[in-house]
Amino acid sequence: MKSVKRVFIEGLGDKPELREIKKELASELRRSNIFGLAGSADQADATLTGRGDTWLKGYYSLNPRAGTSPGSGLPMYGGYVSVELKDRAGVTLWSYLATPHASSRNIAHDLSKDVVKHLVASYEQERGR
């Protein structure tokens, strides 16, 4: 994995939430200052592929009389994203399953940040930092 500099992100799925996760992943990878983004798999050293799903679990309110309706509280999300970083030959270099924290308000951002945090940690561990 230490030879990976440019990463291409394949689509995670067709749901709008998954497209948002892909966008957030790109943003977090750029912010890491370790990986660059490639416009296609041919231009990349590795491809980040995966699957995921998100769903609305309910609404949270500090007011017990408010109930669980959308107008009464903050949304709580559930979901996951499972990703693999594969080299040009299709060999898996790294994989990770991210799930949101219980207090997640922006699931796309939280999942993406978690994936990139662990990817960077694995990269740095391999490089001996």
Image: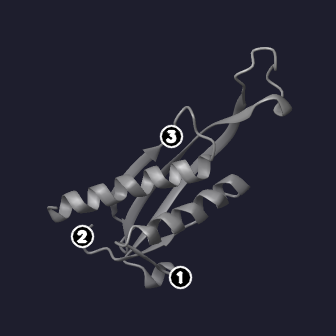
Mark before the other along the chain sequence, 2 or 3: 2
Real-space CA distance between mark 2 and mark 3, rounded to the nearest whole angstrom:
26 Å
Give the numbered dot on residue 99: 3
Residue occupying image coordinates x 52% and y 68%: 26
Amino acid type at mark 3: Thr
Q: Residues within 10 Å of mark 3 (few under 14, many from 20)?
A: many
Amino acid type at mark 2: Lys
Mark before the other along the chain sequence, 3 or 1: 1
Real-space CA distance between mark 3 and mark 1, rounded to the nearest whole angstrom:
27 Å
Q: Is residue 74 above or below residue 48?
A: above
Q: Residues within 10 Å of mark 2 (few under 14, many from 20)?
A: few
Front residue of 114/1: it is: 114
Is there any visible trace of residue 103 in the rendered image? Answer: yes
Give the numbered dot on residue 39: 1
Amino acid type at mark 1: Gly
Real-space CA distance between mark 1 and mark 2, rounded to the nearest whole angstrom:
20 Å
Position of 55 with respect to 49 (left or right) is right
Q: Quadrant of residue 46?
A: bottom left
User: According to the image, label 2 marks what residue?
Assistant: 2
